[in-house]
Amino acid sequence: MAHPTEAWRESQFKDIVTKVANIELYYKAIQFYLDYKPMLLNDLLLVLTPRLDHTRSVNFFTKANQIPLVKPYLRSVQKNNNKAINEALNNLFIEEEDYQGLRASIDAYENFDNISLAQRLEKHELIEFRRIAAYLYKGNNRWKQSVDLCKKDKLFKDAMMYAGESRQVDIAEDLIAWFLESQNNECFAACLFQCYDLLRPDVILELAWRHNIMDFAMPYMIQVMREYIGKVNSLVVKVDKLEQSEAVRSEEEQKAEERPIVFSEPQLMLTAGPGVVPPGVVPPQPGYGGAYGAGPMPTGMPFGYSM
């Protein structure tokens, strides 16, 4: 690097620089390429990629104001989902007015300051970038800001889609009311089905009647009526089955109460109670040992002694 005109060879330089242990020499080599061989800089960066600190590299090129020059390097290392890399590329896409590249980067790599980028894009002169701002607000659950931004730019489809995804009744009804104020009856009818499960049929019927657009609301009301009738019919069927099962159970209980008690097996009778001597057995006599038929106990024997 000290004698680039006589000693520098590209292939040898790239082979040797990867074996250097001092990381500071990497950034000196990058500065050397910026000064003498800027068109070969991305080749050097691809060789040094496993050893570089990507955040420091982005700061280095940002100070040098050379971010566009190293775009291939940034794209190659974006798979690491580094915040500095993502934000540098997103800024580059905005400067290049590449809204498709920005949308793809946002969808694939989420490690960046979403709100800051959305606030920056909502004031952009191009509508596609303002559309991305509404998309970012939606991704951060800022539904009202997202829908309001879509209404401001008349992005009707996005507004209806985000209102439906919000699962918030007030946002959906506000959007419906805005369509009516704008006399956009077609979008009013489309929004009825996009936010179908969030809207209240009585509110929609009243709005349609007040604005004299019952024809636009009638398909929605027919669908609601059909759904309610289906629910009522299924409920009636369940009630009928419950009543039938209850009647069967009551009938079985009544039969069980009327059935007499009958023992299935013959009962054993007691032939002799306690203290009754069975026939043919001689009862014990006084002075005997206590066993049936035993003779008298011999005299003169000690008490408790047995033969």
Image (tube, rainbow, N blue to C red):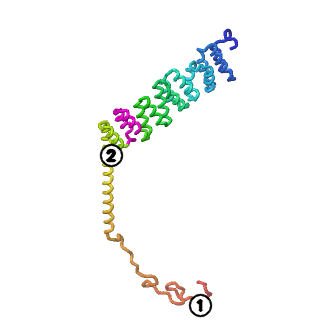
The x and y percentages for residue 277 are 45, 84
Total marks shown come to 2
Above or below — where is 252 with respect to 212?
Answer: below
Q: Which mark is residue 299?
A: 1
**Magenta residue span:** 173-199
User: Does the segment drawn in magenta span residue 174?
Assistant: yes
User: As rendered, which of 293 and 273 lies closer to the eye?
Assistant: 273
The x and y percentages for residue 87 are 56, 27
Prevalent SS, magenta region: helix
Q: CA distance from mark 2 to mark 1?
A: 107 Å
Amino acid type shown at disc 2: Tyr
Q: Residue furthest top?
A: 6
Q: Which mark is residue 172?
A: none
Q: Residues within 10 Å of mark 2 (few under 14, many from 20)?
A: few
Q: Which mark is residue 228?
A: 2
Secondary structure found at label 2? helix
First in sequence, mark 2 or 1: give its number.
2
Above or below — where is 307 with respect to 163?
Answer: below
Picture residue at 33% right of the left edge, 64% below the top: 253
Q: Residues within 10 Å of mark 1 (few under 14, many from 20)?
A: few
User: Does the segment drawn in magenta span residue 275?
Assistant: no
Among the 4 quarters of the image, the one containing residue 297: bottom right
Does residue 139 appear anywhere in the picture? yes
Q: Quadrant of the N terminus?
A: top right
